Image (cartoon, helix red, strand yellow):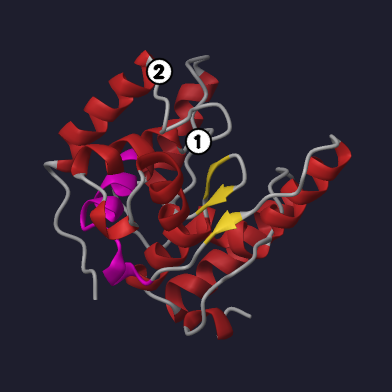
Amino acid sequence: MVFIYRFFPVYYTPLMFIRCYEQVAEGEPVHINHKWVSIDRMSMYMPIAVISSEDNRFMLHNGFDFKAIQQAAIDNEMGRKRRGASTISQQTAKNVFLWPQSSWVRKGFEVYFTFLIEHLWGKQRIMEVYLNSIEMGDGIYGVQAVAKAHFGCSAKELKRGECALIAASLPNPLIFNSGEPSRYMRKRQHHIERVMRYIPHFPMN
């Protein structure tokens, strides 16, 4: 599947099926809003926004940011606010091949799939799959779907600030709605936009 997804779109992920099951269990109609688009049909600001928000060293590491892992361990040990250290590559491996609930078993598989996609896909393909498969709202998956649902435009037409706002929702898109941003989200948006100034241009083709 890793080899196949190097060339073909990822139309469905395990999380999509899990969310459908949850919708049925809660008596809600099943809804999946997802449309695959190639990375050259996305706003040039979208990859930079998620790198600024989720993984500043995405272009430098080999799938695992050991500096972030070390800092997270120190922060957690000292009782500071808990922080994650998952890279965009790890999140992509989890989204496409695994399940969301954290466990040592899943973490082990996550390491395995992260290693594979880093070596078989490369950074551009990882980013393309990530931006197409990540959950971005209730039943919304991928940048094309969230652009249509929350901003009434295509992924290519998203503005810099809108990309930053989408990235601001990613810690928990079921709580943080990029279409109806709270004051906290606006604050995160402005922070992400500041960081974006220092992120190099991302290759889009």
Callout 2 environment at 10 Å: few (<14), some (14 to 19), or many (20+)? few
Quarter-wise, where is residue 112 in the image?
Answer: bottom right
Magenta span: helix, strand or loop, mainly?
helix
Seen in the image, is 196 located left or right of residue 187?
A: left
Magenta stretch: residue 76 in it? no
Q: Nearer the viewer, residue 132 or 115?
A: 132
Q: Taking 67 as reference, is 188 above or below it?
A: above
Q: Taking 151 as reference, is 154 above or below it?
A: below
Task: Give the labeled residue for mark 1.
Answer: 84
- Res. 51 mark: none
Q: Residue at x 32, y 51 (%)?
A: 153
Q: Taking 97 as reference, is 101 above or below it?
A: above
Q: Of label 1 and label 2, which has the lower sequence position?
A: 1
Closer to the camera: disc 1 or disc 2?
Answer: 2
Callout 1 environment at 10 Å: few (<14), some (14 to 19), or many (20+)? few
Q: Nearer the viewer, residue 154 or 114?
A: 154
Give x and y (percent) for residue 94: 61, 56
Task: Give the labeled residue for mark 2.
Answer: 182
Give the CA separation, mark 1 to mark 2: 23 Å
- First to last magenta residue range: 38-53
Seen in the image, is 91 located left or right of residue 96?
A: left
Disc 1 is placed on an element classified as: loop
Give x and y (percent) for residue 126: 42, 67
Give x and y (percent) for residue 130: 46, 59
What is the three-letter code of the residue carrying label 2? Ser
